[in-house]
Image (cartoon, rainbow, N blue to C red):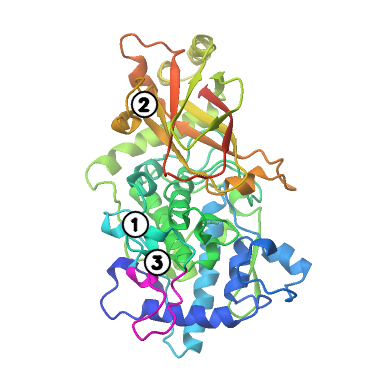
């Protein structure tokens, strides 16, 4: 039997899916944290910190250190495993909920709905069944948690357009790349707190975590996010968007290397308390996992776009894998802080002429000189914002390039380079076994904008000025940016 995951906003009146979800949560929340099918164990599979567990009971038994090491704190972020790992996680979660639904007296075959918040303003409101502490019969509503952005629970708008925009992610031509902007994240090994994100993970994934979590709510924190029932509908949508990306263009495909497909095993407990071990290769086909989405159509337009891009996309990928590595053109010297008001910074680019010349010389020697020459004349231009650290939850920023002094950046969408969503920045700023606390880094592809700007009269390649505009009026932790750099690739 294939489960069909449906849009939560289009469930017909009287549809019992969310009723049974609530009943299942009630059952799962009564199970102790040592039970792998409990609500708390499942959230700890994502991430766990005993000091940050709102359900902690002093002196309670936790799973053994060995079980924790194998099954807890597993979420893959800033990595090409972000999508496959969360797909595995949803898959076992859905089965555990479905079994609890049956235990509660419900039907077989419960399927997790998804929340597609990107269609219009109404879709961006927190779905109604999640907003109120009580059901109409006054019983507790298990879909509600208080620890969210208050506007979300109030049924008001809480997420700006750029939190839910899909164009950046869905128009990426490659799934993964160590340097270039990509859809699914950079190649990594096991990566619990990765340092740089694929575009789908950045927006809408990270953006909506921050938006729903607000300044203190669970969704804004990796260690508590999965305690919020809306987490799972958010992730079903992200998982669906992976299918959308693959289907909207025949040139889009998943990584084919063993490093992604089969080298790294991930362990879970299933609904029968059995250990199952999955690799990315096991989850690339959702129908092999007995589920599919009711809608994977392309939100970015029907028309000709999907037909025109394949050739270009293939070329880009080939050109890159055989090409010259990205070269640094310039960077800021000292770290700086960005505040809760717009911050400007100048990026010197002393090497831009020599790098461009060297790439042109190199390209002239390439076998396919025409193609390579045009790549050298119009290199990919990458703006990197590196080693962003903060000691706590921090605001996110829009980054703009060369907004005229005194002008309002938001009036210049054509100068917007992209979004820095700082979901997870506190975790990434702490030194751990894997990382030295170097924070988050973002790679914004500004190729088109750069070439437009550089074609204008009076262009001075050394007058690159960035504006960091906070997304919300949060008084978050102070954010330090290690460096901003410009690369030609
Ligand atoms: Cu592992 Cu949405 O987070």
Q: Report how far apart the C-alphas of labels 2 and 1 lie in the structure.
A: 28 Å
Task: Choose between 267 and 339: the one closer to the eye.
Answer: 339
- 351 left or right of 15? right
Query: Is the CB–ligand 1 distance for label 1 below 8 Å?
Result: no
Magenta span main SS: loop
For mark 1, does the 10 Å Cα neighbourhood hold few (<14), some (14 to 19), or many (20 or more) residues?
many
Labelled pair 1, 3 in contact (Cβ < 8 Å) = no
Q: What residue is disc 3 on?
A: 292
In the rendered structure, which segment of residues is drawn in magenta? 128-145
* Mark in front: 2 vs 1: 1
Picture disc at residue 448? 2
For mark 3, does the 10 Å Cα neighbourhood hold few (<14), some (14 to 19), or many (20 or more) residues?
some
The image shows residue 174 at horizontal and vertical percentages of 46, 40
In what quadrant of the picture does the N terminus appear? Answer: bottom left
Quarter-of-image position of residue 223: bottom right
Picture disc at residue 117? 1
Quarter-of-image position of residue 273: bottom right
Specify whether residue 355 is painted magenta.
Answer: no
User: Can residue 283 be seen in this snapshot?
Assistant: no
Sooner in the amino-acid sequence: mark 2 or mark 1? 1
* Residue occupying the point 33% across, 69% down: 128
Labelled pair 3, 2 in contact (Cβ < 8 Å) = no
Task: Choose between 28 and 175: the one closer to the eye.
Answer: 28
* Residue occupying the point 45% across, 47% down: 200
Q: Report how far apart the C-alphas of labels 3 and 2 lie in the structure.
A: 36 Å
For mark 2, does the 10 Å Cα neighbourhood hold few (<14), some (14 to 19), or many (20 or more) residues?
some
Quarter-of-image position of residue 84: bottom right
- 177 left or right of 405? right
Specify whether residue 137 is painted magenta.
Answer: yes
Sooner in the amino-acid sequence: mark 1 or mark 3? 1
Task: Choose between 218 and 162: the one closer to the eye.
Answer: 218
């Amino acid at each position: 039997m294939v489960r069909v995951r449906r849009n939560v906003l289009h469930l017909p009146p009287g549809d019992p899916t969310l009723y049974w979800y609530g009943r299942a949560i009630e059952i799962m929340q009564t199970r102790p944290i040592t039970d792998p099918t409990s609500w708390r164990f499942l959230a700890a599979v994502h991430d766990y910190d005993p000091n940050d567990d709102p359900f902690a009971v002093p002196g309670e038994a936790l799973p053994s250190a060995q079980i924790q090491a194998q099954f807890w704190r597993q979420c893959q972020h800033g990595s090409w495993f972000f999508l496959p790992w969360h797909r595995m996680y949803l898959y076992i979660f859905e089965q555990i909920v479905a079994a609890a639904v049956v235990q509660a007296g419900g039907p077989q075959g419960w399927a997790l709905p998804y929340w597609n918040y990107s269609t219009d303003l109404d879709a961006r409101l927190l779905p109604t069944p999640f907003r109120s502490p009580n059901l109409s019969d006054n019983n507790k509503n298990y879909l509600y948690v208080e620890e969210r952005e208050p506007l979300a629970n109030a049924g008001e708008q809480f997420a700006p357009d750029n939190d839910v925009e899909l164009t950046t992610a869905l128009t990426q031509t490659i799934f993964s790349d160590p340097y270039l902007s990509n859809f699914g994240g950079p190649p990594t090994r096991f990566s619990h707190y990765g340092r740089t994100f694929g575009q789908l993970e950045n927006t809408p994934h990270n953006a909506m975590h921050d938006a729903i979590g607000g300044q203190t709510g669970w969704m804004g924190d990796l260690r508590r996010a999965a305690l919020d029932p809306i987490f799972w509908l958010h992730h079903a949508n992200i998982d669906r968007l992976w299918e959308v990306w693959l289907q909207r263009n025949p040139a889009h495909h998943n990584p084919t290397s063993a490093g992604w497909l089969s080298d790294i095993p991930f362990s879970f407990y299933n609904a029968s308390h059995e250990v199952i071990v999955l690799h990315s290769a096991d989850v690339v086909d959702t129908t092999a996992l007995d589920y599919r989405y009711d809608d994977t159509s392309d939100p970015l337009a029907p028309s000709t776009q999907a037909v025109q891009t394949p050739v270009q996309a293939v070329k880009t990928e080939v050109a890159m894998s055989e090409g010259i590595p990205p070269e640094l053109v310039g960077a800021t010297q000292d770290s700086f802080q960005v505040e809760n008001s717009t911050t400007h910074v100048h990026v010197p680019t002393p090497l831009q002429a020599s790098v461009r010349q060297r790439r042109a010389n190199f390209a002239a020697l390439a076998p396919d000189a025409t193609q390579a020459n045009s790549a050298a004349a119009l290199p990919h231009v990458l703006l990197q914002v590196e080693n962003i650290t903060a000691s706590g939850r921090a605001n996110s920023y829009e980054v703009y390039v060369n907004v005229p002094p005194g002008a309002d950046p938001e009036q210049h969408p054509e100068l917007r380079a992209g979004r820095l969503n700082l979901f997870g920045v506190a975790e990434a700023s702490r030194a751990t076994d894997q990382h030295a606390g170097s924070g988050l880094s973002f790679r914004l592809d500004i190729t088109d904008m750069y070439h437009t700007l550089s074609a204008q009269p009076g262009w001075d390649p050394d007058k690159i000025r960035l504006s960091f505009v906070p997304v919300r009026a949060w008084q978050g932790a102070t954010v330090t940016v290690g460096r901003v750099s410009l690369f030609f690739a």
